Image (spheres, grey):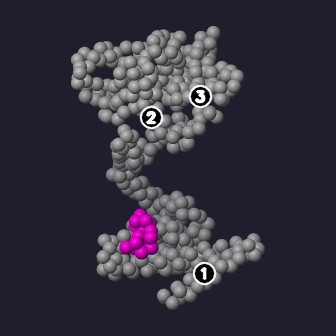
Amino acid sequence: MVEELAQADDVVVACVDDATWALTEDELIAALDAAHRVEQRLAAVKLALVRELDGRGTALTQGASSTAVWLRERLRLTVPAARRLVDLAARVDAAPAAVREALATGAVSAEQARVIVDTVTAVQTAAGPEVADKAVGVLTDWAGQFDPILMRKLGARILDHVAPDIADAAAHAALDAEAARAARDRTLTLSEQTDGRLRLTGTLDAEAAALLRAAIDPLSAPTGPDDTRCAGQRRHDALADVCRLALRTGELPDSGGDHAQIVVTTGYDSLARELGVGALDTGPRLTPDTVRRLACDAAILPAVLGGSSQPLDVGRQRRLITGPLRRALVLRDRGCAFPGCDRPPRWCDAHHIHHWADGGTTTLTNAVLLCGHHHRHLHHNDWTVRLAGDGHPEFIPPAWLDPQQVPRRNHYHRRP
């Protein structure tokens, strides 16, 4: 085999040196098909070699902890790629001979072979080896038409083609097994980073995934032509908006005797001068801009601290835009008031036009509804907002965007 592979290597080297520009279009396509077929056949050879090496324990003999680790060093693969290779080699070796033959003839790719093996294994468990052999033939035919992803979707109903009499019962059993597996594997990990950020990783079951999508998909769309956020940033902000809405309902379980909330500590003078940073009760520090933005729609509890920062006296909450005042604000703005935004009132914060820390009053004439994205946008960019003569908000764009700085309004929310 070594000699034959060396000869094949020489042939491939000769092909690499050929001038592809001299080929006609038909010749280029034929050469691509041939190269792909050779690649698939070589994949069959590679899997057979990996399976034999793994079976012999060569990796352990040579001092590696596993075949995957040995392949990483030998072939310069990543460990996940090496593990997939070892796993596929074992699966193909245990599969019906027709799967190995299809791979060896170039009829299927390595990824298609993985789909076939997974599907045939499930069929054999549900219906026995004879039906599994039929499934191999159908799946091999599909491999000539469909990519691995579509093959896997079609394979979920393979029994409709090879054993229709038991297909429904098997589908129900597979669905129950999938539900049990999803319930077992569901997880969410919050990994705290040194700067207060969190890395979210996890796997949601189908119901939780549907709930998450239903909650954040409407909020993940671009808010207008000025929205320069990438899709990942929009989903991040949408998740934050969902959390704000949940906190605003007041229906979350208490945490330590208090309503669920985030707590930011800062000095009043620093807040008023827009210079001071803030600190979350969990430790991370926030920029002055973030503190002032959060203060727009938060309860403020004045506190007197001793020399070592111990609380001596904590006052009552004040200056929230809540109750009848917020209802009046909703009736006036009917949603995010920023031009072109369609976010409804429940996704919006109440923003003080003239900041409360600067002496602004908590009144209808000093408030405007803004969604989370445009609340941040207003705090971090050069836009300004004011109430026009008719009592409705209008926004002044920065000079770099509109040298004339013509006031703009939101025309999306219909008014009576």
Q: Amino acid at mark 2?
A: Ala
Residue 73 placement: quadrant: bottom left
Seen from the viewer's position, the closer of residues 388 and 337 is: 388
> Which numbered marker is on residue 369?
none
Residue annotated with mark 2: 240
Question: Which amino acid type corresponds to the residue marked 3 in the rendered image?
Answer: Cys
Residue displayed at 34% across by 25% down: 265
Q: Would residue 166 appear left or right of 343 to someone viewing this image?
A: left
Q: Looking at the picture, how far across and down is residue 21, in whole percent?
A: 73, 73
Real-space CA distance between mark 3 and mark 2, rounded to the nearest whole angstrom: 17 Å
Q: CA distance from mark 1 to mark 2?
A: 55 Å
First in sequence, mark 3 or 1: give its number: 1
Element on which disc 2 rests: helix
Given the current orientation, which residue lies at the most extreme bottom position?
Answer: 3
Mark on residue 341?
3
The kind of secondary structure the magenta stretch mainly shows is: helix
Q: Dot 1, crowdedness within 10 Å: few (<14), some or many (≥20)? A: few
Is 88 magenta? The answer is: yes
Residue located 43% across and 27% down the image: 288
Left or right: 255 in relation to 292: left
**Residue annotated with mark 1:** 13
Q: Is residue 356 magenta?
A: no
**Residue 46 visible in image:** yes
Q: Secondary structure at mark 3?
A: loop
Give the answer, above or below, for where 363 lies relative to 170: above
**Do the residues bearing badges 3 and 1 touch, measured as CB atoms within 8 Å?**
no
Range of magenta residues: 70-90
**Label 2 neighbour load within 10 Å: few <14, some 14-19, many 20+:** some
The one nearer the camera, 409 or 125, is: 409
Disc 1 secondary structure class: helix
Q: Residue at x 39, y 21 (%)?
A: 270
